[in-house]
Image (cartoon, rainbow, N blue to C red):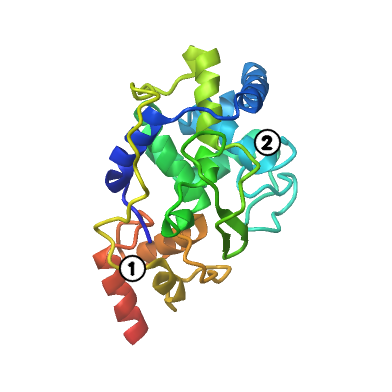
Amino acid sequence: MSYQFAALQAEYTALLQRMVITRPNEVDRVARKLIEYIDQKRYTEACNTVGVPQIVAASSFERDASSNFRDSPAQGDPWNQRSHNWPPCGPFSSWTEAAVWAYRHEGFEKIGAANWTWERACYEEEIFNGFGPRNHGRHTGYLWAGSNIYTGGKYVSDGVWSATTFDSQLGVIPVMRRIVQLRPALDLPIKFPAGEGSTIAVPPQASPTEPHDTEALQQANHLGGDPQLDVDGNYGRMTRHAVMAFQAAHGLAADGLAGPDTWAAITKAEAA
């Protein structure tokens, strides 16, 4: 299922307010490492060019590529070669050039440097990895592992969900939070929501505005996904970009969310 940011914003606020880091030594170690990279200005040019906060870029690159600057943030392939995995891109002349391409490809430039909130960071990072865990009633480890919000469960391979597997990696949000605790000047333009440590429980919620499930969308014949979408029920970046390409080709606002107008166009295309 696809989700509008407005449908999830209040949930993210409540989760951020009650988040407590549960793997403090590990989170602290990674946060200090990422601060060193930021101090070395590894992210400065790319983030300034696209308007992405450095803690967002650093935490996601650590999660996806263990901060290996020989790899591209787009998909983890070496940036000095043509990529083998989706999305296709490269070769690039530098990591910075690869990062700028990747951040623009994800639409980060459209957000605006001054408009990044912690809730927006949660949304962009979750859609990057996929909304699939929500279908299983779990908060994604990609965001929350290493905190009390994450209670286990992850995809162990493409389309294969395991409710009993625990994500051994750290989520991006606990790492970002610790970075800001150590270096307040790196906080997002709109600060961390007050109220950390509250006991309000907020389960993942389905979007009230999206009547179609993700598997039906992925099965649609005219989205134009390349490579063809896996029918796994996980609304992630590949599904989002396939929807964006379809919307652009059919004169619709290319937001990557399959609303009523997009579904009407899909139905019309299939009928034709």
Residue 112 appears in the figure: no
Classify mark 1: helix, strand or loop.
Answer: loop
Q: Residues within 10 Å of mark 1 (few under 14, many from 20)?
A: some
Classify mark 2: helix, strand or loop.
Answer: helix
Left or right for 187, reference 203 = right
Left or right for 132, reference 175 = left
- Tag 2: residue type? Trp
Q: Residue furthest bottom?
A: 272
The reply to whether callout 2 and callout 1 are in contact (CB within 8 Å) is: no
Along the viewing direction, whichever of 144 and 201 lies nearer the viewer = 201
Task: Name the disc covering residue 250, or none.
Answer: 1
Q: Residues within 10 Å of mark 2 (few under 14, many from 20)?
A: many
Q: How far is mark 2 from mark 1, CA to CA?
A: 34 Å
In the rendered image, residue 164, in percent from the top left (x then y), is placed at: 59, 55
In this view, 2 is above or below 32: below
Along the viewing direction, whichever of 268 and 153 lies nearer the viewer = 153
Left or right for 186, reference 66 = left
- Tag 1: residue type? His
Image quadrant in which the N terminus is located = bottom left
In the rendered image, residue 5, in percent from the top left (x then y), is placed at: 32, 45
Residue sitting at 32 percent across and 86 percent down?
Answer: 271
Residue 220: image quadrant is bottom left
Instruction: Tell me which label, 2 or 1, sits earlier in the chain.
Output: 2
Residue highlighted by disc 2: 95
In this view, 233 is above or below 57: below
